Image (cartoon, grey):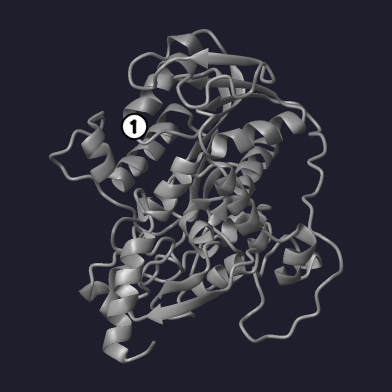
Amino acid sequence: MTTRRSFVKWVSAAGSAVGLTGLPRLGEALELPDGIWTPASPGRARAPLNILILGGTGFTGPEQVDYALARGHRVTLFNRNKTRPGMFNGKVHEELVGDLNNDTSALAGKSFDVVIDNPTTAPAWVRNVAQQLKGRVRHYVFISTTSTYGNDQSAIGLNEDSPTAVLPSDVDPYTLDPQLLGRHYGALKVLAEKEVQKHYPGSWTVIRPCLIVGPLDRTDRFTWWPARIAQGGEVLAPDRPDDPCQYIDSRDLAEWTVRVAEGHELGLFNAIGPAHPFTIAEMLYGVRAVTTQPTRFTWVPWEFLQQHQVRPWRDMTVWQPPYGRTAGYQRRSAAKAIAKGLTFRPHAVTAKDTLDWHLSRPPAEQQATLEGRINGIGMKREAEVLAAWHARTGAG
């Protein structure tokens, strides 16, 4: 692993504000600053808030908790106490135990300045919380998803006014069936957003992030790339180097969410990074820059990947084909959120921190990532596809 002083040589000038441009374009000369990037001090909020975080110990939640505490807010958690129990060891004001499915009684009689709702997919979960908190919350912040725009994301520049997914008429909108929650994830998130607006009129914010990445992400949707590239050798890369790429670091999302709460910013926002167009090559070469193993990328056309059942998003994580129904998937707009202060740390920081976290995981989890058990093509399958590509092209 490289040091922060060496890997920052791949970060665009820190003065261009927290990685707004990601990495330099391939082949582009760039004068880089001497020194290392460090996050700005969070400082203290002007007016401390009483914040309830639903969840809080999963992926983005811990970053919200840490940032809110650093800003001087009082934080209460509500969750099932199953994911990382005791994670905060008394640092938060209170940890309430319950279940959004059927037991929100621990919230009865309580009031909060702000609720940050992280885990909700089912509209019923919003309703169940509202049974206890309706009329007792000044500001409800709901973390949604850009999956609300549905399976057809062919339009370039989807924004907060774009059409959203519709739940089939034969599906109960208050279903708690796990299979239906997964199958109709986007449409149910849309209805959950509407449930928030119904119960907290005039005091709601809905944030729709794209792919969330960074330390603590056990889905391996981004983690696959740092883990794999750190192994070195020939790496299968999807389609064309200039295909678009969008993601948001969990810490950027978490910190901006807290700032939205502090500023009482209301309305609907896409939380998508980086601020300027970013390519899959910039993402991959940026990851390579924070590793030491010799690595080379072999770019294989989408048509060939299809023939060999290599799936976008699942096998070639982060990437979606910039054609047809997914043409706009990685070209959505976050202009509204950026105008309200959403910022982004350098890509190299995200890559290195994710890799460092991955290397701190138990060996069995690290091995599962390299085998592609959750997401990522897996090194064995990757080698098979590369061999087939070389056999077709005659390349070695």
Along the horizontal axis of the image, is 350 left or right of 165? right
Name the one closer to the observer, 150 or 21. Answer: 21
Q: Quadrant of the N terminus?
A: bottom right
Looking at the image, which is closer to me, 180 or 379? 379
- Residue 6: give x, y in percent of width and height: 77, 66
- Snapshot quadrant of residue 12: bottom right
Residue 367 placement (x, y as % from top left): 43, 48
* Label 1: few (<14), some (14–19) or many (≥20) C-alpha neighbours in 10 Å: many
Q: Quadrant of the C terminus?
A: bottom left
Q: Secondary structure at mark 1?
A: helix
Which residue corresponds to the image point at 43% horizontal and 9% vertical from the top-left? 105
Q: Is residue 335 toward the left or the right of residue 132 in the image?
A: right
Query: Number of callouts in the render?
Result: 1
Q: Is residue 65 visible?
A: yes
Q: Position of residue 335 (x, y in %)?
A: 58, 62
Nearer to me, 266 or 58: 58
- The residue positioned farthest toward the bottom in the image shown: 394
The residue at 62%/56% (across/down) is 350
Q: Residue at x 73, y 85 (%)?
A: 29
Image location of residue 277, percent across then percent down: 56, 72
> Which residue is situated farthest in the left direction here?
170
Above/below status of 367 relative to 302: above
Query: What residue sits right under mark 1 in the picture?
Result: 123
Direction from residue 322 to residue 74 in the image, left or right: right
Residue occupying the far right of the picture: 34
